[in-house]
Amino acid sequence: MKTIAIIGAGAAGLAAAVAAAEAARGAGALAEVRVTVYEASDRVGRSILATGNGRCNFSNAVIDAGRYRNASFVEEALGACEATFEGGASPGDDSLLPVDVRANAVLRFFAERGLVWREEGEGRLYPLANKATSVLDCLRAACTAAGVRELVESEVAAVEAPRGEGDRFTLRLVDRRLERADAVIVAVGGAVGERLLPAGVPFCATAPTLGPIATDPRWPRQLDNIRVRGALELWRGGRLVAREVGEVMFRKYGVSGIAAFNLSRLMEPGDQLAVDFVAAVPEEDAEAFLRARQTRLQGALRRSITWEDLMRGMVLAPVADVLLKACGLRGDAAVDEAGLARLSPVLKGLRLPVTGTGDVRQCQVHRGGVKVTAVDARTCEVRGVPGLYVVGEALDVDAPCGGYNLHWAWASGLLAGKSATARLREGR
Ligand SMILES: Cc1cc2nc3c(=O)[nH]c(=O)nc-3n(C[C@H](O)[C@H](O)[C@H](O)COP(=O)(O)OP(=O)(O)OC[C@H]3O[C@@H](n4cnc5c(N)ncnc54)[C@H](O)[C@@H]3O)c2cc1C
């Protein structure tokens, strides 16, 4: 009997396990290929339960490969996944499904295994039950039905490649067990270390990203825990790198929230963040906007207007305090033309020099891992090590928030799982 060892029972590992075992079963060969998942922790799928604040934003209605790091590799792999899983069973026309479930192989995979979902802002897909367990339950039922063997508390320390013709992979477990396999799928997530992999697999160091941004703390410290709806911009040497509209949350060390998370993937030392507190007002209109406000308030209050008056109702008091201080204006002083010229650019872009990643424990992914140039995008198999596959976050692939990272984990897992079974069935 041939065996496929999957290291890691997170998103990519469980998708790979289902795909590998179902492919074996579909070919009437369950007894010929056995699929075993090795999971370091005491339960499978724990990492999935933590996603999306426990709700699991498991995919996106619009998957654009261009949003991923190493986009052309991802585009080819997602295309291969479509071709590999073309023409799966139709999920029917369930009216609870607001998006076209046939849009891609990942959505078809989940729909066929019973998952119902709904779409939130920006195409984010969540299970209808609004709990990550809903996604995990579908995966585990599919694993059980397909005969996947799950071994928990089984941390793999190293994978050794076959030494020659007829040899197999060796898995060295941390508890000194030795296991053998004919194909291995590495699905250990962002924690992947070079020492786990057979010698010579090209690798780049990993670092946490998609998290809060640390900045010069002078202004953020005063606004700790305040959230504003606005926009964040990343600037490099006078050039706008990216702009994200959304919630901005100030922390003692800098800025958090989805907009900051997304920009953290792009930041470099020396960059500056600009916080736009009135995202809907174009920059060139900002001064006129404030002047019109001054005129309106003068009419309503029947007196001359102070800076505090001008800010009230537009931003929270602590934010007003910071913005006025940043411009050297006193709240109780009367509004004047010179002050308006100073305030409008700060309201549209309070500058915060970037110093690095904020609280790394909040980072959602790791940058780095196995280099994509070492991997065949059509199968996720490592070139030069036949039978070794790397999937999910263990590869140097990451994307912004919105369901893209999990989508990649499922898609690469499905592709590698089915490819591994095909390889063994063909006797390669
Ligand atoms: C708090 C949080 C929220 C997130 N929310 C979202 C979201 O809503 N949507 C989204 O798209 N992405 C989200 N992400 C990112 C997403 O979770 C990951 O990109 C995705 O889980 C990666 O899948 P993976 O299978 O590669 O790795 P993981 O899901 O991390 O799975 C790796 C598994 O391997 C096991 N393992 C590790 N080393 C070994 C070893 N040596 N031997 C055996 N087992 C091992 C681990 O215990 C784990 O179970 C979130 C991430 C975090 C941290």
Image (cartoon, rainbow, N blue to C red):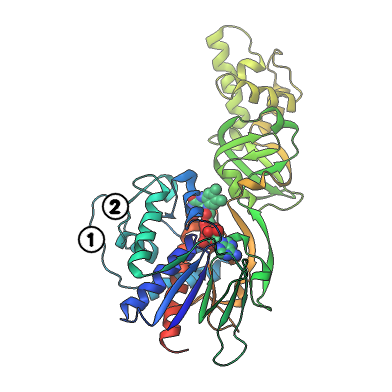
Query: Which residue is under mark 1?
Result: 92
Per the image, label 1 sits on a secondary structure element best described as loop
Query: Which residue is under mark 2?
Result: 97
Q: In this view, does 251 lie above or below 299?
A: below
Residue placed at 54% from the left, 91% from the top?
166
Residue type, mark 1 in image: Gly
Distance from Cα at disc 2 to Cα at disc 1: 10 Å
Estimate the x, y position of residue 254 in percent, counting from the top left.
69, 38
Estimate the x, y position of residue 427 in percent, counting from the top left.
44, 89
Residue type, mark 2 in image: Leu
Total number of numbered labels? 2
Which quadrant contains ligand 1? Answer: bottom right
Query: What mark, if any, has residue 176 been given in the picture?
Result: none
Q: In this view, does 258 lie above or below 31?
A: above
Q: In this view, does 284 lie above or below 40?
A: above
Q: Nearer the viewer, residue 301 or 80?
A: 80
Q: Residue furthest top?
A: 302
Residue placed at 23% from the left, 54% from the top?
94
Report whether residue 393 is seen.
Answer: no
User: Which is nearer the N-term, disc 2 or disc 1?
Assistant: 1
Residue 308 falls in image quadrant: top right
Name the quadrant of the N terminus: bottom left
Q: Which residue lies furthest to the bottom in this view?
A: 165
Per the image, label 2 sits on a secondary structure element best described as loop
Estimate the x, y position of residue 156 in percent, counting from the top left.
59, 68
Q: Residues within 10 Å of mark 1 (few under 14, many from 20)?
A: few
Q: Which of 186 and 294 is in front in this view?
A: 186
Estimate the x, y position of residue 14 in percent, counting from the top left.
45, 64
Q: Residues within 10 Å of mark 2 (few under 14, many from 20)?
A: some
Q: Is residue 421 above or below residue 48?
A: below
